[in-house]
Image (cartoon, rainbow, N blue to C red):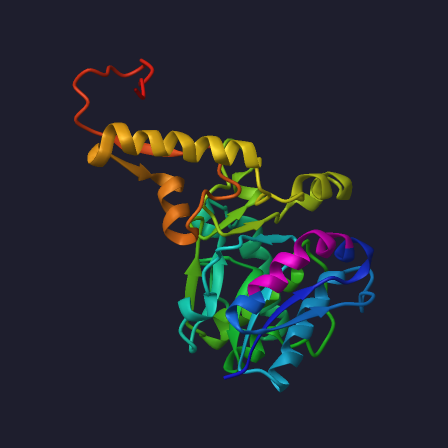
Amino acid sequence: MRRAVVTMAVGEAGRDLLNITGDGIAAYAARLGADYHVIAGEPGRPEYPYDDKFRVAEFFDFYDRVLYIDADIVVAPDAPDLFAAVPEENVGICNERLYGARFGNMDREVGDIQAHRGFRRQRLRAYYNSGLMVLSRRHRPAVEPPATPHHRIYHTIEQDLINARLIEYGFPVTEFGPELCWMFFAEREGRTRAGRPFHHYAGASTLGRGHVMEMLGDPFADVWTPADRRLVYDVLGRLDAVLGDKYVLSGGALFGQTRHGDILRWDDDVDIVAAGLPDWRPGEPLRLE
C-alpha cells in the first residue's frame, strides 16, 4: 500500500511557515515509511489560497492513503503513526467540538454550502478541522476541487465544504481531540502544549504574520545543556545509591526513558515518586548522603 504525507506551502506566507515546520513533517513521513510531498508555488486563487488544499485529491492518482498536515502544524519527534491509528475505511480528523468550539457560525456556513451544492441539510453534530486529515482513496470525493466556484467566501470556506461533503457522503470518522493535537485557537490561554504530539497554530494568523512566526519557533527544541544533562544523571545516580527501589521515575521523565532512553529534549524537569522515607517531610530538602 502506497502512502504519502502531504503539506501545503503556497505563496510567501506558506513558504515562511514551512521553513520552520517542514523538517519535522519530512522526518515524520520518513519514520512512517511514507513519501513526502509539498503542494507549492503561487496560490491558484490569490484571494483565497487555502483552496489549494483541494490539490491533495491529485495524490490519489498514485497513493492509496494520504496524511495531510497543514504547514502551521509542528510535529513532535515521537508523534504516533496516524495511518496505523485510523482504519482504512475511516477519515481521521480533529473534531473542534472536543475543544469546546461553538458551532453557530459554522453551522450557518455549512448549511449555506449544503443548499448551494444541492446537499441534504443536516445540522452539525461535529465540526472538523481540515488541517490534519488521514484519507484513503475512497475519500477522494471529500477533497476534490469544487466543480463550480464558491458562491461566497467564508474565513474557512474549504473546511466548511469538506465538512458538508463528509456529511453528504456519510464517510465514517475517527475523531482526533486535545490529547493528540494542541490547537492555538482553543487552548492559547493557560494551557500547556506539553505531551501533545501535534501543535496546530490554527487561528493564529488573525494576530498577524510576524507574531505567528515568532510563536512557532521550535516548541520541541532541546532545553538541556550538556552540563544540565550530566547534573541530572549524577543526581539520579545518587538517588539510586540512597533510595534503591524506594523511588521510580514518573510523568515525562518516565516517558522519555521508556520511549527514547533519555530525558525528553523539550521537558524542563525530572519527575520522581518516592515512598518509604520516614525521616523526610514534604517541603524539606532530601539529603543524598
For this orientation, the residue located farthest to the bottom is 61
Task: Tell me which segment is drawn in magenta.
Answer: 16-28
| Residue 276 position within the rendered picture, expressed as x and y whole percent measured from the top left | 16, 26
- Indicate the quadrant where residue 252 lies: top left
Residue under the point 24% across and 14% down: 281
Q: Is residue 18 magenta?
A: yes
Residue depicted at 49% across the width and 62% down the height: 93
Q: Residue at x 66, y 80 (%)?
A: 58
Residue 98 versus residue 191 in the image, above or below: below
Is residue 191 visible in the rendered image? The answer is: no
Q: Nearer the viewer, residue 84 or 284?
A: 284
**Magenta stretch prevailing secondary structure:** helix
Residue 24 appears in the rendering: yes
- Residue 280 is left or right of residue 206, and the answer is left
Query: Is 192 rendered above or below residue 127?
Result: above
> Which residue is drawn at the image coordinates 39% and 29% (left, top)?
235
Q: Position of residue 217 (x, y in %)?
A: 67, 43
Q: Which image quarter is the C terminus in? A: top left
Tell which of 235 and 116 is nearer to you: 235
Up/down of 217 relative to 90, above or below: above
How many numbered discs sit on the rendered protein? 0
| Horizontal and vertical percent position of residue 46 | 83, 62
Which of 158 and 275 lies nearest the eye of the viewer?
275
Is 226 left or right of 48, judged from the image as shown? left
Q: Position of residue 54 (x, y in %)?
A: 67, 71
Q: Is residue 236 magenta?
A: no
